[in-house]
Image: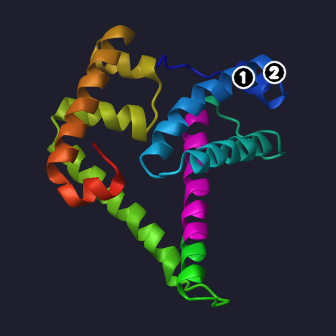
Amino acid sequence: MQFYKFDEAYLERLCSGDFRTESHFVAYFSELIQLKLRSRVNSPQAIEDLRQETFARVFVALRSEGRLRQPERLGAFVNSVCNNVLLEYYRSASRDNSVEEEDGANIPDPSLDVVAILSHKEMQQKVRQVLDELSERDRRLLREIFLEERDKDGVCKDFNVDRDYLRVLLHRAKQAFKAIYLKNTPAEELRSKGAD
């Protein structure tokens, strides 16, 4: 995937409803959103619904009065909207399951909302543990690109590499992360999440 640098002109076109910019934006972020959702949601239909809901909310927010003013934060904004949509989905799924299990109970157990939040917290903890086991370079690279969502040109400058080699370094760092994650995750947990 080619990383794109968002600027003020792009954000203005997006907010004004420019068709080509919207199409680019949806195509660019769809791949990232689907990657994120596939690891958390089993149903392809639910993934598509969550993707569409994320974009619907992003477009409403971008066109509102207090809209996003920093184009470099667009990726982080889309990610946070997706996280909120996903949490709501977990809560809704928990409520639906509790109603079915309780055989007609009218009020779902509010503690079920906590389950989704705790699960999210556990995943964050696991990611931190895996990051701590990576080499300094891999850990720094993954944090700066994916967690801090820094500008790729700035990262290239800091690491003294060009964009092509940055992709190679990112690929290696992701492979190292995956290997440690799989090594540290019990087989039963991987099977329950549908991992290979």
Q: Is residue 170 left or right of residue 109?
A: left
* C-beta proximity under 8 Å, tags 2 and 1: yes
The amino acid pointed to by label 2 is Phe
Residue 5, by quadrant, is top right
Residue at the spot x=59%, y=56% of the render? 84
Q: In this view, does 145 lie to the left or right of 112?
A: left
Q: Which of 176 and 51 is in front in this view?
A: 51
Residue at mark 2: 19
Q: What element carries label 2?
A: helix
The amino acid pointed to by label 1 is Ser
Residue at the spot x=72%, y=27% of the render? 11
Residue at mark 1: 23
Is residue 85 part of the magenta span, yes or no? yes
Residue at the spot x=56%, y=55% of the render? 86
Q: What's the CA distance linking mark 2 and mark 1? A: 6 Å
Secondary structure mainly formed by the magenta segment: helix
**Residue 46 placement (x, y as % from top left):** 59, 51
Residue 164, by quadrant, is top left
Q: In this view, does 15 lie to the left or right of 73?
A: right
Circle 2 packing at 10 Å, graded few (<14), some (14-19), many (20+), is few
Magenta-drawn segment: 73-93
1 shown above or below 128: above
**Residue 51 placement (x, y as % from top left):** 63, 43
Q: What element carries label 1?
A: helix
**Residue 114 placement (x, y as % from top left):** 47, 76
